[in-house]
Amino acid sequence: QTLYDYQQSLQTVFTLECFDNLVKNGRMKPLVGTLLHALGIHVIADATPEGTIRVRDKARGEANTFKRMVKLMAEVKDPTDTEVIIAHCNNESGALRLKKAIQDTLPVKSVELIPTRGLCSFYAMDKGLIVGF
């Protein structure tokens, strides 16, 4: 029961720079994906309790994206003394900047960086960041 309760308390927030897989899977219209990428717009999303993806925000530029991700983290869960893991797909420098934004804003216990692998790499695509907390 304790492990189940812990699992239920976990949250995921992520941002994507490339939308090719969402377009290929029919989750986004090709024109929308092309426009978002061309305009440098990042999608900020999270996971619902049912396990589906929910787009929560859009931002232009890395700094605004990270601010909105941190804000979303605080909205979905009290981050006090939370252990945060940032998985990055070929984006360690972006992950380090996001780590700093989280540590400067939220009262988290720790932030660890790891590279994505396997299926997470497929969905995050190049430069994607996935935050678990």
Image: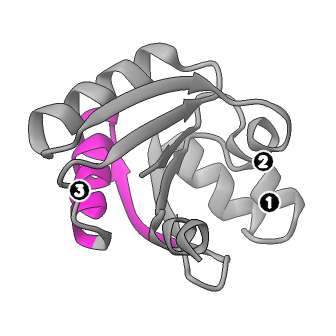
Front-most of 59 and 113? Answer: 113
Q: Which residues are magenta?
A: 55-75
Residue type, numbered disc 1: Val
Which numbered dot is residue 79?
3
Residue 97 position within the rendered picture, expressed as x and y whole percent measured from the top left: 30, 23
The residue labelled by disc 1 is 23
Q: What is the distance, in whole Å, between disc 3 and disc 1 at their CAs?
A: 33 Å
Disc 2 + disc 1, Cβ < 8 Å? yes
Residue type, numbered disc 3: Pro
Which numbered dot is residue 111?
none
The quarter holding residue 28 reads bottom right
Residue 116 position within the rendered picture, expressed as x and y whole percent measured from the top left: 69, 30
The residue labelled by disc 2 is 20
Indicate yes or no whether the magenta region holds residue 83.
no
What is the magenta segment's predominant secondary structure? helix
Q: What secondary structure is found at the residue carrying circle 1?
A: helix
Residue 21 position within the rendered picture, expressed as x and y whole percent measured from the top left: 81, 51
Q: Residue at x 35, y 31 (%)?
A: 111
Disc 3 + disc 1, Cβ < 8 Å? no
The answer to whether 115 is drawn above or below residue 83 in the figure is: above
